Structure formats: C-alpha cells, structure tokens
Amino acid sequence: MTDAELQRLVEHISQVSFGRPFRHQATFNARLRTTGGRYRLTDHNIELNPKMLTEHDLATLIGVIKHELCHHHLHLAGQSGQHRTAAFKQLLKQVGGLRFAPAPAPVIKPRHWQMYQCTRCQQVYYRARKINVNKLVCGRCRGRLKWRQTILATTRPHT
C-alpha cells in the first residue's frame, strides 16, 4: 500500500466512522518501532507503522487508523485526546478502534562471532569481540590461540 492509498483509506474511514472529513496528511513511517501509529499535535498529521499492514492484516491497520483518528478529531474539537479520558474511551468504543496496537515481531539481527582454536589441544573458543592472541592463552592447556574464522549467527555457536 502506498502513501496515496493510505491517505484515501484514512479519508474514507474518517468520513464513514466519524462523519467528519480528514483534511491533513496520513503517511507510513518506518521509524516507528514500538507503536502502531502517532498523531502529531503540531500539524495534525497521522503517521502509521507499516508493520501493522505487513505483519498483521488490514483489519488491524484500520483499527489503528481509527485510534489515531480519535486523537485527531477530539483534539480539533478542543477536547483532550489523551488515552485516559472518558471521551476518548467512549469515542474509540463507538467507532470500534483498537485500544492497543499488537506488538511488532522482534528484529533479531545476526552477529559476527570470532572463532579461535588452540594450536596444542584443538579446543575451540567463540568470542563476540576479537582478542589479542599474543596475550591470551588456552584455558585448558595454556597453548597458543589462533584465529580461524568469523561466523555470522544469531546466537553463540556451540563448541
């Protein structure tokens, strides 16, 4: 879904569910990590997390849009659009928006693990950082360590 399609969807939901037009901008913001969307008080624009559409379904995105539109319309009406107010909770329930956005899937990045091996007993060591092989020795036999390779893995490799 593009930003233009999102804009049309937000305008349609605003007109159908709230009976008021949405005259500001609605865009996707990939920098949002822990929230489904954001209503900006300064310019009245709405930013939505694209993961609400890619990791979840269209119904979830619509629920988040309704949540942000509740903030928008209450703020423009001169009322407090905070989550704790009765007006916000009542309007959110009336239009069927989501109270909480589902948590996005955690991003697990692989790390570079350094593999070292003892030249005497062949014991293998994995370290996240490079070590000085001129200073450190094998813990089992006090032999010299030699760097072997860098391994890309999400967890520490097993010896």
Image: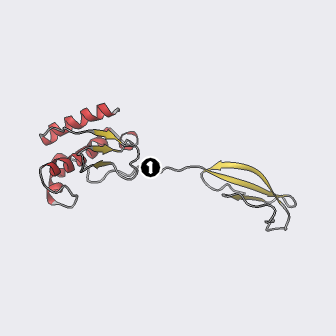
From the viewer's perspective, is 121 left or right of 116? right
Q: How many marks?
A: 1
From the viewer's perspective, is 77 left or right of 152? left
Looking at the rendered image, the quarter that the C terminus falls into is bottom right
Picture coordinates of residue 92, whole percent (x, y): 19, 51
Looking at the rendered image, the quarter that the N terminus falls into is top left
149 versus 24 height, above or below: below
Identify which residue is drawn at 26% across, 39% down: 25
Q: Going by the picture, which residue comes out furthest to the right?
A: 120
From the viewer's perspective, is 139 left or right of 37? right
Picture coordinates of residue 56, whole percent (x, y): 37, 42
Q: Name the residue under label 1.
A: 105
Identify which residue is drawn at 22% across, 58% down: 83
Picture coordinates of residue 57, whole percent (x, y): 34, 40
From the viewer's perspective, is 34 left or right of 143? left
Under mark 1, the amino acid is Ala
115 versus 135 height, above or below: above
What's the colour scheme?
A: secondary structure
Residue at disc 1, secondary structure: loop
102 versus 134 height, above or below: above
Q: How crowded is mark 1: few (under 14 residues within 10 Å), some or many (20 or more)?
A: few
**Viewer-nearest residue: 16 or 8:** 8
Identify which residue is drawn at 47% across, 51% down: 106
Identify which residue is drawn at 53% across, 50% down: 108
**Viewer-nearest residue: 134 or 12:** 134
**Viewer-nearest residue: 139 or 132:** 132
Picture coordinates of residue 130, whole percent (x, y): 71, 57
